[in-house]
Image (tube, coloured by chain):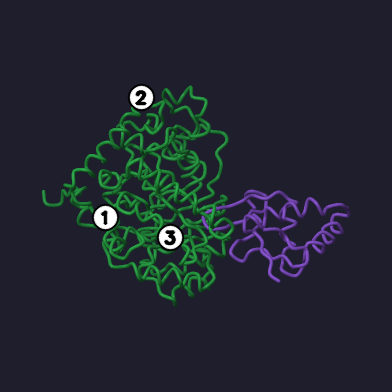
Amino acid sequence: MAGYNNQTNITPPRWLLAELTYSCPLQCPYCSNPLDYANYKTELSTDDWKRVLTQARKMGAVQLGFSGGEPLTRQDLPELVKHARELGYYSNLITSGYGMSEEKIVQLKEAGLDHIQVSIQASSQELNDHIAGTASFQHKKDVAHLVKKHGYPMVLCVVIHRENIHQMPEILAMAEELGADYLELANTQYYGWAHINRDLLLPTKEQFEQAEAIAQAFKEKVAGKMKIYYVVPDFYEDRPKACMNGWGTTFLTIAPDGVALPCHSARELPGLDCPNVNDYSIEAIWYESKAFNFFRGFDWMQEPCRSCDEKEKDFGGCRCQAYLLTGNMYNTDPVCSKSPEHKTIQQAIDTAKVQSASGNEKPLVFRNSKNSRLLSPEVDFSNR
Amino acid sequence: MTINPQFPILFSPTHRLQWEEAQQKYVILYPEGMVELNQSSAEILKCCDGTRNLVEIVSELEQKFATSGLLNDISAFLEVALKNGWIQQSN
C-alpha cells in the first residue's frame, strides 16, 4: 500500500468514530449511513474492534464515538467501553436510546463510559414516532432522565428539517426539561438518505432564519447552564464548511465491516479504494493508504479553489457534496458562491420550495433494509 | 459568575483532565470536544481538587514554583475556567 504518501506533515487522528453496526430499530429518513447499507452484512468481531481501538489510541486518537446504526444492538458494547477506558479514550455513546435500560446505563458507567448522546426526532410524540418510524418518544425521554440521574453529561441531539423546524421553541423547552448539558441542533446535511429525501426535508430560507433567531435568543438565556452545538445549514451559507477539519487531518471513521473512511460519507465517493482494518494496521491506513491521502493538502484542487486565499480555512469544502451536486468530487463545494456550480444550491432550494407548496408531496423514503435493497440492488451472479 | 475566594474549587466531575502522551500536553475532555492546555493552566487545574480555595491554590503554586505575585494570573484563568464549566464551587 506504500507510495501514496507524499505529505510530510500528516497530523495523527484525534477523533475515532466506531460505527459498530448498521443495525438500527429506527428508520430516520436523513440517516447518514450509506443507502446500500443492507449489502454490508459482516461486522467486525470484539477482538477486531479492540485491536482498532488500541492501534488508534497509540497514534493519539483520544475522542471516541460509539455509533452505528444503533450501537446498543452490539452485546459486546460494555466490553468495548471498558477496553476504551483502559486505553484512556474519552468515550461518547451516540444512541437513539432504543434498547437502553437503567441497568445498562449503570453497567456502561461502571465500564467507564464518559458521555451519552441521546437523539430525539421532534418535540411531540406524534412527529417523533413518525420520523423515527418507531414508537419511541416516551422511552427516549425516560432514557434522557436516567442518563442525568446517573451523573453522565448529556448531549441531546435533534436533527432539524422542514418537518420539525416549526417546533424549535418546543424543542428548546424539552432540552431544558430533560436537563441536557449540551443541545445539538443539527441542521440536516444532505448526504445518503437525506440526499434522496431532500425535497421533503429542506426548509425555506425564511424558516431557517426564524428558527435560528429563536435558537440564538435561547443560547443567551441558558449561557452557563447549557451549551448549544449548532450545525449550520450550509445550503444557506455562501462559504463551505471546513469539512472534517480537512481530509485525513483529524477524523477516522471505521464502518461496521472494518472499512476505514476519512469521513462517514466517503463510501459514496468513487475510486477511493478505502482500506479495511482486516488487511492493514490503522497506522498504515492513516499515513499510507490511497484513500486517506486522496484529498490531503492542496495539490488535488482545481480552480477556483487552487488560487483561493481561503483554501487553508475551508479546504474547498465537502468532497461528498461536490460529488453529489456536481458529479465531480474534485470540484469546489457548490455551497461556495465562488463555485461555477453554485446555482445548483439555489435550484435545490427552489425545487424543495415548489414541492412544499404543491401540497402533493411524494412520501419520505424511510431508512430500512427493504428500501436499502430497492435503492441499491446487489448484483448476484450465483444463479447464472 | 465569578470565583468566590472563600469556597473550595473543584474540577468539574463531568469533564476529564488528562495527560496526552502523543501531544505531550494536558487536555480537558468533554462530550465530543477537547481543549489543549499549556503547562501553567494544567498546574492550576490540578490543584482544583475540592479542598482548596483561591488563596490556598495561589500559595501552593507560588511555593511549588518558588515565585510570588501569581494571584492575578491565577484568578483570571480560573474565571475563564468557571465560565467554560471546567471547574465549580460549592459552599
Position of residue A369 relative to residue A210, above or below, is below
Which is more toward the observer, A297 or B90?
A: B90
Position of residue A212 relative to residue A150, above or below, is above
Report the residue marked by disc 2: A340
Of the chain colours in the picture, the one used for chain B is purple
Q: Position of residue A68 (x, y in %)?
A: 37, 58
Drawn side of residue A19 relative to residue A111, left or right: left
- The amino acid marked with disc number 3 is Ile
Tag 3 secondary structure: strand
- Point out the residue furthest to the left here: A384
C-alpha gap between disc 3 and disc 2 = 37 Å
Tag 2 secondary structure: loop
Mark 3 residue crowding within 10 angstroms, few (<14) / some (14–19) / many (20+): many
Report the residue marked by disc 1: A367
Report the residue marked by disc 3: A94
- The amino acid marked with disc number 2 is Pro
Q: Position of residue B49 (x, y in %)?
A: 72, 67
- The amino acid marked with disc number 1 is Arg
Of the chain colours in the picture, the one used for chain A is green
